[in-house]
Structure formats: structure tokens, C-alpha cells
């Protein structure tokens, strides 16, 4: 972690153009936070527009998994007059964070980029775009694979002494949280790529920690899988391991390019 700590502490060590007094760092950080906060507010406003606009049908998309089970006319129940408002507000807030995420990433990048070398920037910038693609893949995997399997299993449990009367608050919360969880889980290769570009982790280190990754992946999958469903946990844990292996592959590419630039010495040391 020494390399990452040096980056965060110096923000420009070896890069005189990035050096500035400590108070200037704080002022810049305050400005970046304000812009990020504004982006979240605007994202929330856009989210409210999307969930209340009948031509976009965000809520209808979220209703899809439930309607696949109970029919096209199914709707979750509202248990109080305020449920309608707070459900829309919560969904809008999550959509707002997603819409604001490019700005949030940009502000974080603008604050940290002066501390990075050119080769590190060349490795990290593509990772940011890849992160968006992986996030969307994770959401799609949750919507089309994990959710249908999970809901069919859960609905079939306890039918002899319970009836299905899902509330709107719990149903939409369940759907949105699972979609976002899978989206963030799919960011694992990006995290590994960035840490490799900063010199924090190496392919050798990642291979040595493969067993630990299996245990950690299983724990994470069991925490985010709905209803402690074994099949969903297996799917998520398997996805995490595939993503981890993909991250090792990306780390190998990063260190190989670094070794080619340095004459091959680092390839022998890190491979």
C-alpha cells in the first residue's frame, strides 16, 4: 500500500506542476465535493422525472420480475398513504446517484490525476470506461438471471402457510438493491486494474491470494444474495471468481507493459 499512500499524500511527488500548499489542496477538495453534491441533486431531479414520466416506464421495468411471476396486472401493495411518495423518492435517489456517477468519478479523477504519472493515467483512463460497461453487465446479469431464479425459488417456499402480499416499499427496495449490488460487484476487475497501475498489487500477489479471494467472494455473495438463496449465492460467487481471474489477466497486461518499458526486469520480479 506504500505506493498508493505516496500518491494520496503527495499528489504530485515527482511532478512539480501538481505540487501546491496543503490549504490549496483542501480548497480544491472542497470545490470538488461541492460539484459532486450538485451533480447528485441534479441527478435526483432527473431521477424524479424518469420515474414519473409515463413514456420512460422505469417503474414498469422494475415491475417486470414480479409480473413474470404473478401476471401482467400484478402490483405490489402500498400500506400507507406515504408509501407512494417514499418509494418514488428512493428509486429516484438511486437513479440520481447512477446518473451523477460520471461526474463523481470525474471530480475524483481531477483531484487525484495530477499525482499520477503519464503511464498510470494511460492505464487508468480506459479502466473508467470499462467500469461503466461492467456495471451495466452486472445489472443485466442480476435482472435477467439472478432475479428470476431467486424470486421463483422464494415464492415456492412456505406456500402452505403463507400468501404472497408483497409491499411496494420492500419489493422495489429488494429489486433496486440487488441490481446495484451486482453492478458494483462487477467493478472488481476495474479495482484490480487501477491498483495494478498504481503498483499496489501484482499478478504474483493476486495468484497467491486466490484462496482468500474464493472465501471473500463466497462471503460477499452470501451477504447480497436474496433470502440466503443457495443457487443465487453460487451464481454470484462464481461471477466474482471469474471477475477476479479477469482482473489477474488485466494485471498481467499492466505489468508486462511496464516490464517492456523497463527492459524486462519487472516481468521476472512480478510475474
Image: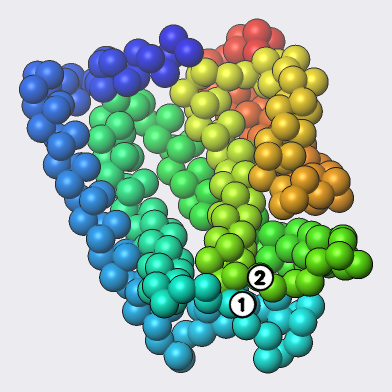
Residue 14 in which image quadrant:
top left
Residue identified by numbered label 1: 76
The one nearer the camera, 118 or 260, is 118
Q: Is residue 100 left or right of residue 17?
A: right
Q: Is residue 258 left or right of residue 237?
A: left
Q: In this view, does 123 lie to the left or right of 264?
A: left
Taking the spot 52% from the left edge, 73% from the top edge, the residue there is 79
Mark 2 to mark 1 CA distance (whole Å): 5 Å
Earlier sequence position, callout 2 versus callout 1? 1
Taking the spot 46% from the left edge, 91% from the top edge, the residue there is 55
Residue 189 % position (x, y) = 62, 39
Residue 16 vertical placement versus 42 (above, below)? above
Taking the spot 34% from the left edge, 19% from the top edge, the residue there is 7
Helix, strand or loop at label 2? It is loop
Report if the CB atoms under discs 2 and 1 are less than 8 Å apart.
yes
Residue 53 % position (x, y) = 40, 86
Taking the spot 61% from the left edge, 38% from the top edge, the residue there is 188
Q: Residue furthest front?
A: 161
Q: Is residue 264 visible?
A: no
Residue 102 vertical placement versus 251 (above, below)? below
Residue 54 vertical placement versus 70 (above, below)? below
Check residue 166 in the rendering and tell me which mark sits there, or answer none.
2
Q: Is residue 121 visible?
A: yes
Amino acid at each position: 500500500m506504500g505506493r498508493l499512500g505516496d500518491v494520496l499524500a503527495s499528489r504530485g511527488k515527482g511532478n512539480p506542476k501538481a505540487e501546491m500548499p496543503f490549504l490549496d489542496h483542501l480548497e480544491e477538495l472542497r470545490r470538488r465535493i461541492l460539484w459532486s453534491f450538485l451533480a447528485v441533486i441534479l441527478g435526483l431531479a432527473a431521477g424524479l422525472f424518469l420515474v414519473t414520466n409515463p413514456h420512460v416506464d422505469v417503474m414498469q421495468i422494475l415491475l417486470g420480475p414480479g409480473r413474470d411471476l404473478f401476471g401482467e396486472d400484478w402490483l405490489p401493495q402500498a400500506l400507507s398513504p406515504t408509501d407512494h411518495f417514499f418509494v418514488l423518492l428512493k428509486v429516484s435517489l438511486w437513479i440520481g446517484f447512477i446518473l451523477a456517477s460520471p461526474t463523481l468519478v470525474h471530480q475524483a479523477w481531477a483531484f487525484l490525476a495530477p499525482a499520477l504519472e503519464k503511464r498510470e493515467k494511460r492505464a487508468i483512463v480506459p479502466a473508467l470506461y470499462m467500469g461503466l460497461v461492467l456495471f451495466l453487465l452486472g445489472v443485466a446479469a442480476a435482472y435477467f438471471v439472478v432475479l428470476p431464479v431467486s424470486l421463483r425459488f422464494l415464492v415456492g417456499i412456505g406456500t402452505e402457510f403463507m400468501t404472497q402480499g408483497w409491499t411496494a416499499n420492500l419489493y422495489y427496495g429488494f429489486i433496486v438493491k440487488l441490481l446495484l449490488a451486482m453492478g458494483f460487484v462487477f467493478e472488481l476487475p476495474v479495482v484490480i486494474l487501477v491498483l495494478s497501475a498504481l503498483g499496489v498489487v501484482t499478478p504474483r500477489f493476486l495468484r497467491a491470494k486466490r484462496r482468500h479471494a474464493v472465501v471473500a467472494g463466497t462471503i460477499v455473495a452470501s451477504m447480497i444474495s436474496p433470502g440466503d438463496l443457495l443457487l443465487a449465492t453460487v451464481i454470484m460467487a462464481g461471477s466474482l471468481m471469474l471477475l477476479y481471474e479477469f482482473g489477474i489477466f488485466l494485471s498481467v497486461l499492466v505489468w508486462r507493459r511496464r516490464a517492456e518499458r523497463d527492459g524486462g526486469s519487472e516481468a521476472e520480479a512480478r510475474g
